Image (tube, grey):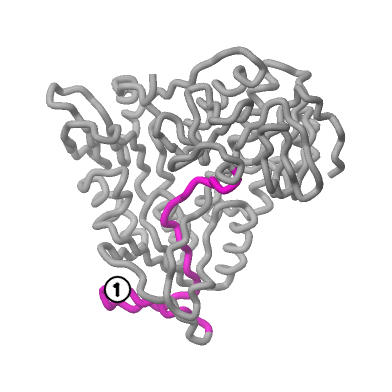
Amino acid sequence: MDHQNQSSSSGIVIIGSGLAGFTVIRELRKLDKAVPITLVTREPGYFYSKPMLSTALASNKSAEQLVSSNAEGMAAQLEITILDDLDVTEINTASQTIETSKGSIPYGKLVLGLGADQIRLPLQGNAAKEVITVNDLEEYAQFRKAIAGKKRIVILGAGLIGCEFANDLVLGSYEVDVIDLAPQALGRLLPEAAAQALQTKLSEAGVRWHFGTTVQSVDRNGESLTVTLANGTVITSDVFLSAVGLKPRLDLAKASGIATGTGITVNRQLETSAKNVFAIGDCAEVDGLVLPYVMPIMQAARALAPNLIGQPATLTYPAMPVMVKTPALPTIVSPPAKGALGDWKINDVEGGLEARFESSDGKLLGFALLGTATAQRGALTKELPPILQ
């Protein structure tokens, strides 16, 4: 796409065309129809729903079908300039320009919506390079190509993404083995009883679990892969998917002298340590929190948009339950805050399970709702304290 020279010094430049980037633009356009906005992305500039990557197989959607609008469509709809297939090499915070593979672009305000990378564990074996991660649409298209006509898939990681993919793949009649060092699925989110319930339902659907162990090596053996686990188990598979978690993309910020912690450090106005530079989404750390989910992005975009056009706003996070897309046993979880004091109380209900994390004086600080208990989501969410107020 051509570099239309719209960027006046008052223009807003956004790096990253994921949910964070596009949501900020939508919020900006509600407030200001005229401010020049340029979106810079190394992707093709299309819009798609990333959360659907882990459920697309069972819903018979190809990678192409997940794209809801191409770059031209998005540029016209939002009245923005999209510069796609562009790598940003440097941010010059003094001159307020970014250097890209096709020249330099000035900004009045800059938003980093850089996202996160899948963590890749160093694995042994001659097929370690064949390990697949799925973190964007193009990687998903490659994954679908790799599994076409195959039967057996190993997933490393029993977290949110690992469990969602496992459920999606067994629904697509694949044989699935899931490996995790933790003793249970969704170790960071669910109490043991809830994890057990989810594991049982996924086992019944065909998932085989390997907990408390890790992958020793991945080797190519003719047509198939031999996956050797630390506990001695050997799994024969066709494709190896790694889903062990995300790490915020920090390199660009670090190289530009912008403060980082686990993520790019921002305050409650989403400002980084550099003047006129903001960050949002999976790459950003707000008050020590990195929350790589849809709801926090929506909240943050609503606070960021006014700040970008000079209307002060402060980010707050209400309780934001996370939906785990596992049709075998639908799960909604709102984990207690780090370091919260209390205990899990487990209630088995017909067709599901309700787990409440309560303080010693009976206040609800978190919950996990499975199966029929997910109907309680609205009522229980109202009882929870905000994450950031």
Residue 30 drawn at (x, y percent): 67, 18
- Where is mark 1, residue-wise? 230
Q: Amino acid at mark 1?
A: Ala
> Residue 287: within the magenta?
no
The residue nearer to you, when weighing 253 against 54, is: 253
Q: Is residue 119 above or below residue 103?
A: below
**Please, which residue is most extreme toward the top here?**
311
- 340 left or right, relative to 325: left
Q: Quadrant of the rendered structure where residue 217 is? A: bottom left
- Measuring from the top left, give residue 297's x and y in whole percent: 52, 32
From the viewer's perspective, is 158 left or right of 74? left
Q: Residue furthest bottom?
A: 222
Q: Is residue 285 above or below residue 139?
A: above
Q: Which stretch is magenta?
A: 223-252
Q: How many dots with numbers? A: 1
| Residue 149, quarter of the rendered image | bottom right
Q: Quadrant of residue 90?
A: top right
Q: Residues within 10 Å of mark 1 (few under 14, many from 20)?
A: few
Q: Is residue 301 left or right of residue 41?
A: left
Given residues 151 and 276, the one toward you in this image is 276
Query: Residue at image x 42%, y 80%?
Result: 226
Can you say which quadrant of the picture contains the N terminus? top right
Residue at image position (64%, 56%) is: 138
What residue is drawn where x is 40% and y is 34%? 289
Vertical placement of residue 198 versus 68, above or below: below
Quadrant in the picture for the C terminus: top left
- Queried whether the magenta region covers residue 250, the answer comes back as yes
Q: Nearer the viewer, residue 56 or 79?
A: 79
Q: Residue at x 59, y 30 (%)?
A: 274
Image coordinates for residue 21, horizontal then vertical, percent: 63, 35
Residue 186 coordinates in the image, percent (x, y): 32, 49
Mark 1: secondary structure: loop
